[in-house]
Image (cartoon, helix red, strand yellow):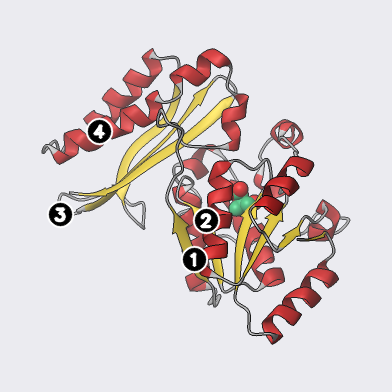
Amino acid sequence: MIETSDIQQLRQQIKSWKQQGKTIALVATMGNLHQGHLSLVKEAKRIADIAIVTLFVNPIQFDKNKDLDDYPRTYEADIAALESHHCDLVFSPSVETMYGKTETATRVEVTHLSDILEGASRSGHFSGVTTVVAKLFNLTTPDFAIFGQKDYQQLIIIQQMVQELNYDIEIISHPIVREKDGLAMSSRNGYLTKDERKVAPYLNKAIKHIKLQILEGASNYQVLCEQANALIAEQGFRPDYIEVRRQGSLLEPSAEDCDLVIVASAWLGKARLLDNIVFSV
Ligand code: PAF
């Protein structure tokens, strides 16, 4: 496995692989890897000749400096895990390599979608994500890029960016990887105390219950979501949003919409947990 933090070396290696006719799949991460990330790496190896993983804690997608400082850096463990998953190249640039010495002025933003739901609570977050992902796409020029469905809004924003900026990259959506009790795997789960960890699966239970009620014919989504918010609040969560939306666009669904997604975000202690279920009625 090649480890580099140097753009020149990255580009030369990719050029050489492309000259040999090899296909490339990218998995972009901020490190602190768990089984969810590693399942993306497995998928990368399954669909392409070469799997590239980026480890970069992207400062411009954090709205609070403290969250950026507190973000766990676990480089050695990440490298060991990637090596055992047959990753071909790890790119872990410094902040200066990615953004230069002074704050960069260029931003890539998918408007509208970046301001709703997660974006309404985390101002500037998604433009930080799309800016770094666009840069990583430009640097690695992959054939495929794989993103977890757990960050559903991020995934569809990136899909829209790829389509509208004419990137020749196939975006692969990978199903959520869950713990046995249903909790979606996330780096943020590490912030949970032992007691909070026991309660955390309630977020998933709450949205599964909404799905069940919809499949049984309930159609007042707002009431269902309010009930779910009250349920998780009783368990100690501070709910941000639980919403039923249209798949793909995240618009409010009309009565005719059959392809739905329930998106949810709630704080539990220091952790902001996200979950979603995609389904059709
Ligand atoms: O999902 C993440 O870990 C990050 O938002 C990403 C896509 C690596 C961009 O920094």
Q: Would residue 44 appear left or right of 249 to someone viewing this image?
A: right
Q: Is residue 6 above or below residue 70?
A: below
Q: Would residue 180 appear left or right of 220 to someone viewing this image?
A: right
Q: CA distance from mark 4 to mark 1?
A: 29 Å
The kind of residue tagged 4 is Ile
Q: Is residue 221 visible?
A: no
Q: Is mark 4 within 8 Å of ligand 1?
A: no
Q: Earlier in the sequence, mark 3 or mark 2?
A: 2
Tag 4 secondary structure: helix
Image coordinates of residue 203 in percent, x first then y, are 39, 28
Q: CA distance from mark 3 to mark 4?
A: 18 Å
Mark whose residue sits in front, 4 or 1: 1
The kind of residue tagged 3 is Glu
Tag 3 secondary structure: loop
User: Which residue is rendered at x = 57% and y = 60% of the image?
Assistant: 109
At label 4, counting other C-alpha atoms closer than 10 Å, the crowd grade (few under 14, some 14-19, many 20 or more) is many
- Pick the residue in front: 168 or 66: 168
Q: Mark 3 highlights which residue?
A: 256
Q: CA distance from mark 3 to mark 2?
A: 29 Å
Q: CA distance from mark 2 to mark 4?
A: 25 Å
Q: Would residue 228 appear left or right of 112 to someone viewing this image?
A: left
Q: Earlier in the sequence, mark 4 or mark 1?
A: 1
Tag 1 secondary structure: strand
Q: Is residue 180 above or below residue 99?
A: above
Q: Is mark 2 within 8 Å of ligand 1?
A: yes
Q: Mark 2 highlights which residue?
A: 147
Q: Earlier in the sequence, mark 2 or mark 1?
A: 2
Marks 2 & 1, CB-CB < 8 Å contact: yes
Image coordinates of residue 141 in percent, x first then y, are 65, 74
User: Which residue is rendered at x = 47% and y = 63% of the image?
Assistant: 172
Q: Mark 1 highlights which residue?
A: 171
Mark whose residue sits in front, 3 or 4: 4
